[in-house]
Image (cartoon, grey):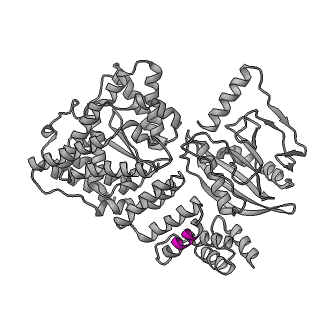
């Protein structure tokens, strides 16, 4: 009989054990959790009813085709949760949702959703810890049930569940979401509590708490770069932010690190290694949103944090090709050609160049790239179409 | 709002007001949206119009099978009606090649369903319809309820205008069972 434990699970075990031994416990937080470890409400209570509905959602999430199930990535994210809160680690289950928008959501029963769009925007593990820590803060303070109880009528309460379902699939009417966002939004006090708890957890776990402010700074910059719309993001709808909040986080970080002097880290390598596994999928999905200013902002940041340059150029090629503004054809060709100089460039760049050169009436280069595409993908789903075009070009 | 939901709401309202007019599309040659087609089976045309130049048919109900029929879409126009400012519909350009037509169809469907469907493309190939070359391909995706669906798409550009038909049905049983009739229908198209 063979016995296998994944490296990721060993990491979770090791991190939890070591940190339990050496780290200050949840009692070191300035805002104490209001629930015990392994808390479950009375099933007959309103909170019990709320949990029941959320647990039904969780069963659907486990089977959802929109869930990213890569074992190593999931175990890595769970290990960060366990580093932040060794005591409550077993009560929190993280599900990575295949949605290129930025969102993370905490549910009262310990289910947490984090969307793939988060990984596209963050730069290191400390920033991931700030998002996870913030959401854990909501869980430890039972903000969701407080919000649920404050809602005045059943239909509004049902909307909270609908938004949860929408968070699962990303498929929720944006109009519905935005009109319901006033109901789904946490109060300022709740947001402040979650910020403080998340930041303190980060710091006690050894992460550089200044990265918390960095995250909000990145998101604000991306939102400002997006000239086309108002509050589209589900995250903004449920986590209102401001320059004041960013400034508060930065001040709290400084005070925390002055009080608890130790070595703080950002930890980039493992984070970027894990993100690289879903990079192509997440960026392709982001392009399909047609949020080209956002995509450009994301790619620009990726250049500075050394993701695979071939992939970055490839996605610039895709961006310009899909955007289709005057001059974009040439920009797209140039980006794909640059990307193809490296082995790691996805070879369907050849196909896109084939079509682009066809439009530019450069038959020789069009045929060359179509030929390269079929050499790399002899069983491509569109091989019949490519062969048809090669014959036309003859 | 999702397409199905919209269709159901509009249909329900029209039924209540006794204005619903599902129209029979018989299994005989007809001219629709600027081209001719001979449906291999009869359909019911919905009073709901998903696009300015598009109509939708069904046999057993929208969830089980639907045929989107569109044509005479000019440069700068969209395949489907815009449902939200945040999810603009892609616009047709007359010089689009197959990869761009594929993107146009996929993005239109995705944005109709609130922007986050994940669609895979299969079996992209040319299809002769009379003297016209059309592009045919299949799509595969999970809808909001987790039901796996397939679409069979045929599109062509003639006189700088876009024409086409898109059949969609659940993968389990319905898509395959209508394949022979669908092939016959698409083969009958006169552009």
Going by the image, does B76 lie left or right of A372? right
Instruction: Write the residue at 75% across / 52% down.
Output: B74
Confirm whether residue A79 shows in the render.
Answer: no
Residue A329: within the magenta?
no
Going by the image, does B11 lie left or right of A173? right
In this view of the protein, which residue sits in the foreground, A294 or A309? A294
In this view of the protein, which residue sits in the foreground, A264 or B149? A264
- The secondary structure that most of the magenta stretch takes on is helix
* A301 lies above or below A100: below
Instruction: Write the residue at 88% across / 46% down.
Output: B31
Instruction: Write the residue at 81% across / 58% down.
Output: B159
Confirm whether residue A32 shows in the render.
Answer: yes
- Number of numbered callouts drawn: 0
Residue A355 pos. (x, y %): 65, 69
Residue B52 pos. (x, y %): 73, 42
Residue A331: within the magenta?
yes
| Quarter holding residue A366 | bottom right
- Residue range corresponding to the magenta coloring: A330-336
* A391 lies above or below A153: below
Residue A340 pos. (x, y %): 51, 75
The quadrant in which the N terminus of chain A is found is: bottom left
Going by the image, does A346 lie left or right of B169? left
* B53 lies above or below A342: above
Residue A352 pos. (x, y %): 60, 68
The quadrant in which the C terminus of chain A is found is: bottom right
Instruction: Write the residue at 79% across / 36% down.
Output: B45
């Amino acid at each position: 009989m063979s016995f296998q434990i994944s490296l990721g699970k060993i990491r979770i075990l090791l991190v939890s054990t070591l940190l339990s031994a050496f780290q200050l416990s949840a009692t070191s937080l300035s805002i104490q959790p209001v629930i015990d470890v392994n808390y479950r409400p009375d099933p007959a209570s309103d909170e019990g009813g709320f949990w029941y509905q959320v647990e039904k959602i969780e069963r659907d999430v486990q089977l959802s085709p929109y869930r990213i199930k890569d074992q190593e990535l999931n175990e890595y994210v769970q290990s960060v949760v366990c580093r932040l809160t060794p005591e409550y680690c077993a009560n929190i289950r993280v599900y990575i949702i295949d949605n290129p928008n930025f969102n993370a959501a905490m549910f009262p029963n310990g289910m947490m959703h984090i969307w793939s769009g988060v990984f596209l925007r963050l730069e290191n593990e400390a920033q991931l810890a700030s998002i996870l820590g913030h959401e854990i803060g909501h869980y430890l303070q039972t903000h969701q049930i407080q919000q649920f109880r404050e809602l005045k009528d059943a239909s509004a309460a049902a909307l909270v569940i609908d938004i949860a379902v929408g968070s699962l699939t990303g498929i929720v009417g944006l109009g519905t979401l935005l009109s319901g966002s006033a109901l789904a939004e946490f109060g300022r006090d709740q947001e402040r509590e979650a910020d403080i708890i998340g930041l303190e957890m980060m710091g006690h776990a050894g992460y550089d708490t200044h990265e918390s402010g960095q995250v909000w700074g990145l998101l604000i910059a991306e939102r400002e770069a997006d000239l086309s719309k108002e509050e589209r993001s589900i995250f903004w709808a449920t986590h209102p932010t401001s320059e004041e909040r960013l400034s508060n986080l930065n001040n709290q970080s400084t005070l925390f690190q002055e009080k608890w002097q130790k070595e703080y880290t950002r930890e980039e390598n493992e984070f970027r290694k894990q993100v690289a596994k879903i990079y192509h999928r997440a960026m392709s999905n982001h392009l399909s949103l047609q949020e080209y200013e956002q995509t450009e902002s994301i790619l620009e940041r990726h250049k500075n944090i050394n993701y695979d340059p071939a992939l970055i150029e490839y996605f610039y090629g895709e961006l310009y090709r899909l955007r289709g503004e005057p001059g974009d054809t040439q920009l797209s060709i140039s980006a794909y050609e640059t990307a193809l100089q490296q082995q790691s460039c996805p070879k369907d760049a050849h196909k896109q160049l084939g079509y682009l050169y066809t439009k530019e009436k450069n038959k020789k280069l069009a045929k060359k790239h179509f030929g390269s595409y079929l050499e790399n993908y002899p069983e491509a789903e569109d091989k019949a179409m490519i062969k048809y075009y090669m014959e036309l070009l003859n | 709002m999702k397409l199905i939901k919209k269709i159901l709401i509009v249909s329900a309202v029209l039924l209540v007001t006794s204005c619903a007019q599902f129209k029979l599309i018989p299994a005989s040659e007809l001219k629709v949206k600027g081209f001719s087609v001979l449906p291999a089976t009869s359909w019911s045309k919905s009073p709901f119009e998903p696009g300015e130049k598009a109509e939708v048919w069904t046999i057993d109900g929208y969830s089980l099978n639907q045929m989107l029929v569109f044509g005479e879409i000019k440069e700068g126009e969209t395949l489907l009606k815009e449902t939200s400012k945040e999810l603009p519909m892609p616009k047709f350009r007359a010089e689009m090649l197959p990869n761009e037509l594929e993107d146009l169809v996929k993005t239109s469907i995705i944005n109709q369903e609130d922007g986050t469907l994940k669609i895979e493309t299969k079996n992209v190939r040319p299809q002769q319809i009379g003297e016209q070359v059309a592009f045919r391909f299949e799509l595969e995706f999970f809808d909001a309820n987790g039901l796996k669906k397939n679409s069979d798409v045929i599109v062509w550009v003639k006189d700088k205008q876009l024409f086409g038909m898109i059949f969609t049905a659940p993968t389990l049983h319905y898509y395959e069972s209508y394949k022979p009739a669908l092939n016959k229908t698409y083969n009958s198209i006169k552009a």
